[in-house]
Image (spheres, rainbow, N blue to C red):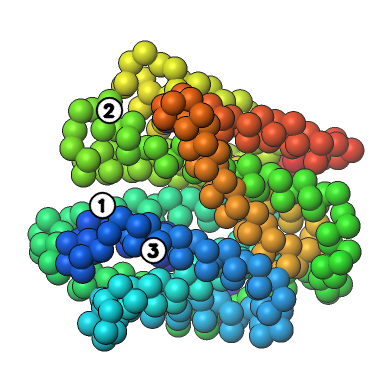
Amino acid sequence: MRNAGHTIRASYVGYVTQAIVNNFAPLLFLTFAKEFDLTLDRLTLITTVNFGVQLAVDFLSAKFVDRIGVRTSIVAAHGFAAAGLAGLALFPGWFRSPYVGILAAVVLYAVGGGLLEVLVSPIVEACPTERKEAAMSLLHSFYCWGHLAVILLSTLFFSLAGISRWRILALLWAAVPAANGFFFAKVPLFPFTGDSGPIPIRSLVRRKTFWILLVLMVCAGASEQGMSQWASAFAESALHVSKTVGDLAGPCAFALTMGVARALYGKYSEKIPLTKMMVSCAVLCLGCYLLASFAPSPVAGLIGCAACGFSVGIFWPGTFSFAAKKLPAGGTAMYAFLALAGDVGCSGGPTLVGLAADALGGNLKRGLPAAMLFPILIIILVPVLTAGNRAHTKGEP
């Protein structure tokens, strides 16, 4: 008989699926450019469409998920992801314009990715487990492991089979969400808000705590992406290697340390209060940004970049854990808005760095400290969020 443990394991694979959705196509950008004669602006639009659709789904799911049901939505999420990944292999040959075919596939898997982002965390949060922060942190580590798997296994496949067989790999990756969608159809799901029902959206948006949580999610996404966008450049500069090797070394190091941070907190959450962990990691994040920006040695800059992955690892799952504690009746709408805020941060962090760099004569390294605004806000807002809740047991915020 299936139990909550099966639900949690299915959720782990759900985050691996989201990692595939977000990170597989960019590995093929140069291949797309050569095979389909695509310009840089068209390649850029692939990423823009992916995250734009996910943002739209985050927003709309606050209304429609509760109407059609969580199980239907989570199974559909995997179906869309599988169809989109398979579509990468098939649609360019089916459409008159291969580029339109690629975009159609991206829209499909982006719908799946958006739904997964909204649903997987509250599904795990609702499971009857005692160590909620640990479960949430470990869950989010699987996005990191999925990211690493996509990069390393895809690179291995290309080296053995050749880049020309990328369509086969797209179909193989599509099998992951396809299989997990069938699994999610059978595992038990638990109510997000208990017996009381969710807080109406109008009441939710009137609560100060809700807005603090949204700002924390923006900061979580911005702190992470503000650095990770430049991970490859740091690796190339520090190691004096080709862009291909730099793409592997930089993003892999960042994803690895971020995953390690989440896994470690999942193991030791009972010994470290979440409030203290969030603030300490925000301080570490500030130090990593300073080291990456001002270290005289390129290798030291790369160390700062990699360590930043560790420092930001807890921000996203930690904010979800705070939300579950502070607004336990927030329901699907709350998690949808949190996912939306996180995606806004993922877009806004790199944008702020880029604007600052442009103002400083195009020096990206000197523009990086602009993103320090976000861990500073985390240091300020986490104590505000937890004020008045000092009499908690050890291991709680």
Side of 20 where 76 appears, left or right: right
Residue 66 numbered tag: none
Can the viewer see residue 50 in this picture? yes
Side of 114 where 230 appears, left or right: left
The x, y position of residue 357, in whole percent, is 47, 31
Side of 55 where 166 appears, left or right: left
What residue is rendered at 36% in x and 20% in y? Answer: 300
Amino acid type at image mark 3 = Ile
Amino acid type at image mark 1 = Leu
Q: Quadrant of residue 94?
A: bottom left
Residue 46 numbered tag: 3
Q: Nearer the viewer, mark 3 or mark 1?
A: 3
The x, y position of residue 320, in whole percent, is 67, 53
Label 3 – label 1 distance at C-alpha:
22 Å
What residue is rendered at 52% in x and 53% in y? Answer: 140
Q: Nearer the viewer, mark 2 or mark 1?
A: 2
Which residue corresponds to mark 1?
152
Q: Nearer the viewer, mark 3 or mark 2?
A: 3
The x, y position of residue 148, in whole percent, is 34, 51
Q: Quadrant of residue 164?
A: bottom left
The x, y position of residue 155, in whole percent, is 20, 54
Q: Decide: few, some or many residues near mark 1? Use Cα within 10 Å; few <14, some 14-19, many ≥20.
A: some
Label 3 – label 2 distance at C-alpha:
27 Å
Residue 237 numbered tag: 2
Name the residue nearer the viewer: 185 or 379: 379
